[in-house]
Amino acid sequence: MPLRLNPTFRDRLDGSDRTLVGLWACSGSPLVAEILAGSGVDWLLIDMEHSANTLDTVLAQLQAVAGYPVTPVVRVPYGDDVILKQVLDLGAQNVLVPMVSTAQQARDLVAAVRYPPHGRRGVGSALSRSARWNRVDGYLQDADQHVSLFVQVESAEAVAGAAEIAAVDGIDGIFVGPADLAASLGVLGQQTHPDVIAAVNTTFDAVRAAGKPVGVNAFDPAAADAYINGGAAFIAVAADVSLLARGSEALAARFIPTTPDTTRASY
């Protein structure tokens, strides 16, 4: 029975007249990913770079969120051909590659996610979820329509080359990472430092001028608002683990006295 795949993140961005808002899935739990998917957000970043996610947990999360109107994006740990091939074969239609600093890196990544003669992605659609085990008609011929590729700008070098990176055919958008960008600019841990904000806005201008969508990670609500007003096409505003950490801390602060309990015996 022929099957159809979902629209890519590229397609969703093309058809949207507002900023698409997303959350990170770092816990590795398909149950948590499903909870996030049902929250009403537009997209979900399943992260393999800064979490314990594996191919098995990525697959489980893709399956868990498949029934919800949310677009999953898988961030691979780095731009490796084998990892990209495996993640695509799992059925990820949208991939994000961190730490891309040059147009040549971007071109190499495009080749890694495309089949010959336009790239070097290994052919295994009959064996994999990507083509639903050859139940998607014409998958090999139309694979580029079913896959979108986004890369991260997160260094001073990448900001300087953002226009060239964005102009590479096959790069569908740029995602700015203020945390590593802050480190690159010498202000580690200060994602809202004026120099970082200026670099993000410079990247916004360069990428939009190249005709591509640009997004950013911003867990600080004020920064997120500013970037949305500044033209971000997509944004990530929190992660499952940060929501749990901050929420549990707030409950502890609400119900546990801040003064020492002198009535308890000490041993």
Image (spheres, rainbow, N blue to C red):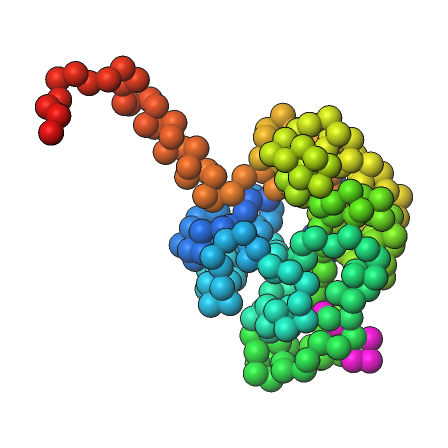
Image coordinates for residue 235, horizontal then vertical, percent = 65, 41
Vertical arrangement, residue 135 with respect to residue 256, above or below: below
Residue 202 appears in the rendering: yes
- Quarter holding the N terminus? bottom right
Number of marks in the rendered image: 0
Image coordinates for residue 67, horizontal then vertical, percent = 50, 59
Q: With 37 as the anchor, is 109 left or right in this view?
A: right
Q: What's the residue at 61%, 69% (across, down)?
A: 83
Q: What's the residue at 51%, 67% (across, down)?
A: 55
Toward the viewer: 188 or 255? Answer: 188
Residue 67 belongs to the span the image colors magenta? no
Residue 94 appears in the rendering: no
Q: With 193 as the anchor, is 265 left or right in this view?
A: left
Q: Quadrant of residue 227?
A: top right
Q: Which residues are magenta?
A: 113-118
Q: With 24 as the anchor, is 158 left or right in this view?
A: right
Majority SS type along the magenta span: loop
Toward the viewer: 20 or 79? Answer: 79
Vertical arrangement, residue 24 with respect to residue 170, above or below: above
Image coordinates for residue 74, horizontal then vertical, percent = 60, 58
- Quarter holding the C terminus? top left
Q: Quadrant of residue 200?
A: top right
Toward the viewer: 117 or 48? Answer: 48
Image coordinates for residue 225, horizontal then vertical, percent = 66, 28
Q: Quadrant of residue 231?
A: top right
